Image: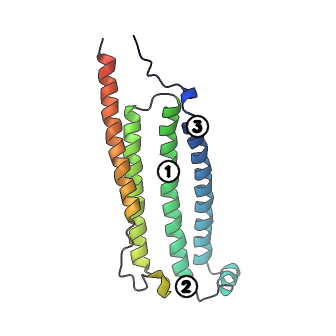
Amino acid sequence: MRIETEIGPADAPMAKLLAILLIVGQVALGIGFVILLLMAIIMVVPSGLRESLIADSARPIDAGSLSARCFAGAVVAAGWFFVLAVLRRVVAAVIHGDPFLPENVARLRNIWMIIAATEVFRMIAFFVMGGDGDASCGNVDGSRLDIRVGTWFFIFIIAAISEAFRHGAALRAEQELTI
């Protein structure tokens, strides 16, 4: 008696839905990246547009500070864009019925490393730029790191999943050698 363990494309409807959602997420991040980068450039270059945008603000805004924040946001958006691009390759392997590839182990490792690097950059940028002068920000003097525990748990979970995939890929390779 043989139990069929092969997973085909028809058996992965959630993976197909996830693939579509990842594309939508990448498009949104790409648009956000472009908007943030354009805003950073607009705030660096003295122009009438910059002055009119600043004049319409309810409170005083420093153009240099806003430019730095927009640039930092663009860097974070780019990091998450690449995370979704790599995750799309993992999901494609799942859709094709072959999730435990050695390439997926490397992809999952890349995902958690990119997320960790993006989060470290975000924390440092927030610390260096400090608050925006508003007491509700909580980091007015730049004396606190904004550590997001949920993001770090997410990173550790993906690192653990990458190790589980490594073990699964090793078992699969061993099974292929068994007669």
Closer-to-camera residue (177/2)? 2
> Could you tell me which residue is drawn at 42 percent across and 48 percent down?
111
Q: Which percent across, then down, holds residue 2?
A: 40, 13
Tell me the element at label 2: loop
Quadrant including the C terminus: top left
User: Residue flagged by tag 3: what amino acid is it?
Assistant: Lys
Q: Mark 2 points at which residue?
A: 62
Tell me the element at label 3: helix
User: Residue flagged by tag 1: what amino acid is it?
Assistant: Phe
Which label sits on residue 134? Answer: none
> Could you tell me which residue is drawn at 48 percent across and 56 percent down?
79
Label 3 crowd (10 A; few <14 / some 14-19 / many >=20): some
Of labels 1 and 3, earlier in sequence is 3
The coloring applied to the image is: rainbow
Does residue 48 sit above or below 114 in this rendering? below
Quadrant including the N terminus: top left
Which label sits on residue 16? Answer: 3
Pointers 2 and 1 in contact (C-beta within 8 Å) = no
Of labels 2 and 3, earlier in sequence is 3
Residue 133 visible somewhere in the drawing:
no
> Could you tell me which residue is drawn at 67 percent across and 87 percent down?
55
Mark 2 and mark 1: span between their CA atoms? Answer: 31 Å
Q: Which percent across, then down, holds residue 174?
A: 29, 22
Residue 139 visible somewhere in the drawing:
yes
> Could you tell me which residue is drawn at 49 percent across and 51 percent down?
82
Q: Mark 1 points at which residue?
A: 82
